[in-house]
Image (spheres, helix red, strand yellow):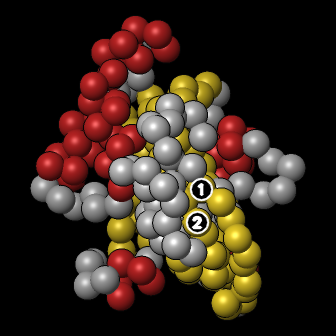
Amino acid sequence: MNQPHLPNETAELVRQEVAFQGYFRVVRYFFRHGLHQGGQSKVISREVFERGQAAAVLPYDPVRDEVVLIRQFRAGAYVAGHHPFTWEVVAGIIEQGETAEGLVRREAMEEAGLAIVDLVPIQNVMLTPGACSECCHIFLGRAETAKAGGIFGLESEGENILVKAMSFAEAHDLVERGEVDNAVSVIALQWLALHREEMRRRWR
């Protein structure tokens, strides 16, 4: 927790219980927390979806001014009424003993066949803080995109991932048209829009 606390912003975990255990886990927590006007809240219960901590990388070639995005079926998007196939950056869940940097290098190779030669941290964000414990470390990764593209993913995990290299301008147009509709990818591409010239100078 790297944010400064305002007065009386305290929280106490009273107890917890597993509400559901499947491929993912839902835990029911019982909390008591400080009130902004002073004093303490009554004990409240909240179910929290727990799927681990994530990391993501936007591969970027500063010489060609290209990024690499991936596209795959997403059950959550389908259920929400969005297009069931989404443009995304490379991402995955950090395994025990693995660093966020190690995860994005591994996933870039597994999901896109790309070697990441340098990383710049963008942000560490909570994705749905009201309901999910997952946060995501987002990076910009330097890569060579000249031969990027194809279909990747682990068949054993049901992955079928389309990989496409495109100009930064084309990728940013996807954001502007609402065709990139997941938060991590929007954050990464908008960050690059703000820092692109700086990164091109640094990495050329």
Q: Residues within 10 Å of mark 1 (few under 14, many from 20)?
A: few
Name above or below for residue 23 compared with residue 144.
below
* Residue 150 or residue 22, whichever sits in front: 22
Q: Residues within 10 Å of mark 2 (few under 14, many from 20)?
A: some
Residue type, mark 2 in image: Arg
Q: Position of residue 118 (x, y in %)?
A: 61, 25
- State the CA–CA distance, disc 2 to disc 1: 6 Å
Name above or below for residue 30 compared with residue 137.
below
Most extreme residue toward the left is 177
| Residue at the spot of label 2 | 32
What mark, if any, has residue 55 been given in the picture?
A: none
User: Which secondary structure, mark 2?
Assistant: strand
Q: Position of residue 116 (x, y in %)?
A: 62, 35
Q: Position of residue 55 (x, y in %)?
A: 60, 49
Name above or below for residue 1 compared with residue 82.
above
* Residue 101 or residue 21, whichever sits in front: 21
Q: Position of residue 4 (x, y in %)?
A: 50, 32
First reached walking from the N terminus: tag 2 or tag 1: 1
Q: Are marks 2 and 1 in contact (CB under 8 Å)?
A: yes
- Going 33% across and 21% down the picture, which residue do you hit? 195
- Going 26% across and 78% down the picture, which residue do you hit? 82
Asked if residue 173 shows in the view, the reply is yes
User: Which secondary structure, mark 1?
Assistant: strand
Residue type, mark 1 in image: Ala
| Residue at the spot of label 1 | 11
- Going 72% across and 78% down the picture, which residue do you hit? 16
* Residue 124 or residue 34, whichever sits in front: 34
Res. 141 image quadrant? top right
Res. 12 image quadrant? bottom right
